[in-house]
Image (cartoon, helix red, strand yellow):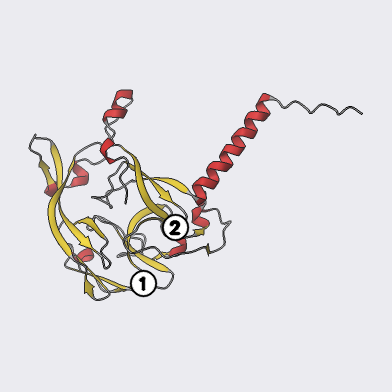
């Protein structure tokens, strides 16, 4: 007996099936492997500029509901969980009152104590070395203008181009992890604090732009407070694009506004 011919699928049906499969692949990759993240603020200067775009790996610290788009509650608690390494730059979900993704550097692990004294991190009772290095300078552009810089730090470079100039330091954590931080001056509420003891199941995070970062030094909504490990979504690994905010509708400005030298920078 002859087999009946298979029904011919319409072009619309095939297109829909393809798009559905593509969306599923993108969902799996974004949830469990890699996700893009864009930098909206100056809190992680000098490492990250407003307008930087980077990839975050999702497998480093395990998975929770915040691994999924929009925090869909399909994963109970945290599975395959691991604690970040001190010094990692991580993306995490902010407290519910803020309800958005944030990027900061992990400074304190569960059970550790952190304190700020005269702008220096005191970790478990020991001062973290902080060495003065050359000033950090950044041209004033569309996404980092004079208002963001502040009048105190505005300057011009040798060519007369307006720039922002901040005092810069190198901080070195126990174990040798080293990175640059900015310190705009003595600010009592953030440079001299009481001692924080990180609760179990949490980490203490700080922005590298120490005087312009709402982080674990402050409770929400001013800052982040202690960050639950299940809110940590992934680890920043590499920048894939950067723009200074000067682009307009004209296509050629899309290229001139790109900061090509920042593409490919790792952590």
Above or below, 27 against 142 in this view is below
Measure the C-alpha gap from mark 2 to mark 1: 21 Å
Write the residue at 21% across / 68% down. Answer: 128
Camera-nearest residue between 212 and 31: 31
Q: Toward which corner of the image does residue 261 lie, by quadrant? A: top left
Neighbor class of circle 2 (other Cα within 10 Å; few <14, some 14-19, many 20+) is: some
- Viewport quadrant of the N terminus: top right
Asked whether, in this view, residue 246 is left or right of residue 235, the answer is: left
Camera-nearest residue between 57 and 101: 57
Write the residue at 42% across / 52% down. Answer: 100
Q: Residue 54, image x and y in percent?
A: 37, 45
Neighbor class of circle 1 (other Cα within 10 Å; few <14, some 14-19, many 20+) is: many
Camera-nearest residue between 192 and 92: 92
Q: Mark 2 vs mark 1: which is more N-terminal?
A: 2
Query: Which residue does the numbered mark 1 point to in the structure image?
Result: 198
Write the residue at 22% across / 55% down. Answer: 180
Asked whether, in this view, residue 6 is left or right of residue 159, the answer is: right
Q: Toward which corner of the image does residue 210 lie, by quadrant? A: bottom left
The nearer-to-camera label among 2 and 1 is: 2
Question: Is residue 101 something that shows in the picture?
Answer: yes
Query: Which residue does the numbered mark 2 point to in the structure image?
Result: 60
Q: Toward which corner of the image does residue 22 lie, by quadrant? A: top right
Element marked by disc 2: loop
Q: Residue 157, image x and y in percent?
A: 10, 39
Element marked by disc 1: loop
Q: How many marks?
A: 2
Write the residue at 29% across / 44% down. Answer: 50
Q: Residue 70, image x and y in percent?
A: 51, 50
Question: Is residue 244 something that shows in the picture?
Answer: no
């Amino acid at each position: 007996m002859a087999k009946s011919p298979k029904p011919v699928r319409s072009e619309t049906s095939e297109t829909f099936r393809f798009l559905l499969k593509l969306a599923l692949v993108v969902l799996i990759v974004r949830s469990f492997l890699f996700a893009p993240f864009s930098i909206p603020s100056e809190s992680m200067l000098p490492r990250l500029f407003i307008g930087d775009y980077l990839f975050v790996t999702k497998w480093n610290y395990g998975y929770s509901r915040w691994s999924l788009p929009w925090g869909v509650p399909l994963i109970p608690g945290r599975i395959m969980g691991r604690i970040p390494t001190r010094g990692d730059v991580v993306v995490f979900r902010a407290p519910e009152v803020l309800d958005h993704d944030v990027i900061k550097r992990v400074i304190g692990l569960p059970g550790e104590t952190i304190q700020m004294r005269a702008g220096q991190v005191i970790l478990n009772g020991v001062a973290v070395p902080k060495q003065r290095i050359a000033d950090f300078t950044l041209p004033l552009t569309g996404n980092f203008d004079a208002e963001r810089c502040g009048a105190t730090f505005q300057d011009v470079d040798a060519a007369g181009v307006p720039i922002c100039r901040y005092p810069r330091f190198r901080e070195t954590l126990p174990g040798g992890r080293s990175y640059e931080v900015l310190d705009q001056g003595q600010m009592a509420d953030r440079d001299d604090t009481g001692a924080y003891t990180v609760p179990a199941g949490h980490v203490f995070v700080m922005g590298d732009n120490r005087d312009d970062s709402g982080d674990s030094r402050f409770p929400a909504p001013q800052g982040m407070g202690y960050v639950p490990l299940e809110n940590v979504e992934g680890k920043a690994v590499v920048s894939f694009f950067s723009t200074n905010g000067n682009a307009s509708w004209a296509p050629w400005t899309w290229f001139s506004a790109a900061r090509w030298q920042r593409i490919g920078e790792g952590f």
